[in-house]
Amino acid sequence: MSVVGTTVVHRRYVPYGHAHYGGSLVDGAYSLALFGDAATEVCIRTDGDEGLFAGYAAVAFHAPVRAGDVVEVTAVVTREGRRSRTVEFTCHVTCRADSARGVSAAVVLDPPLLAVSATGTVVVP
């Protein structure tokens, strides 16, 4: 049975404690860590093992991720080798804080904002 097309989706609120730069910006490593979590679930679902992340072939930062955002990370298996899988990742901002309207105000972004995309390889036993 082919694992190509297997998709995992994670959503997460980005807490203010993760703001790393001015303007409540979160560092790029935050999204890459989420990609790692999604890759782990992909490996569990396809191979019954957490697997290992071998590396990235490409990473692109398209828009900022900020504290107060809700992000949605998607991982899709696009290639299956004997022990490796190529996975395409995206991180979209689906909701964003709107401090201009109030300290706890937020909006749903429609359409979601593509923040990060990447291609990676995982290896399973």
Image (cartoon, rainbow, N blue to C red):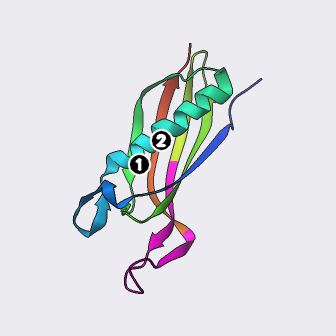
Closer to the camera, 16 or 42? 16
Amino acid at circle 2: Phe
Neighbour class for label 1 at 10 Å: few (<14), some, many (≥20)? many
Q: What residue is rendered at 50% in x and 26% in y?
A: 122
Tag count: 2
Give the answer, above or below, for where 86 lies relative to 73.
above
User: Residue 107 appears at what percent x and percent y?
Assistant: 51, 77
* Helix, strand or loop under label 1: helix
Residue numbers of the magenta segment: 90-111
- CB-based contact (under 8 Å), mark 1 and mark 2: yes
User: Residue 53 appears at what percent x and percent y?
Assistant: 45, 27
- Residue corresponding to mark 1: 31
Classify the position of the C terminus by image quarter. top right
Q: What residue is rendered at 46% in x and 44% in y?
A: 34
* Label of residue 35 in the image: 2
Horizontal relation, residue 4 to residue 113: left or right: right
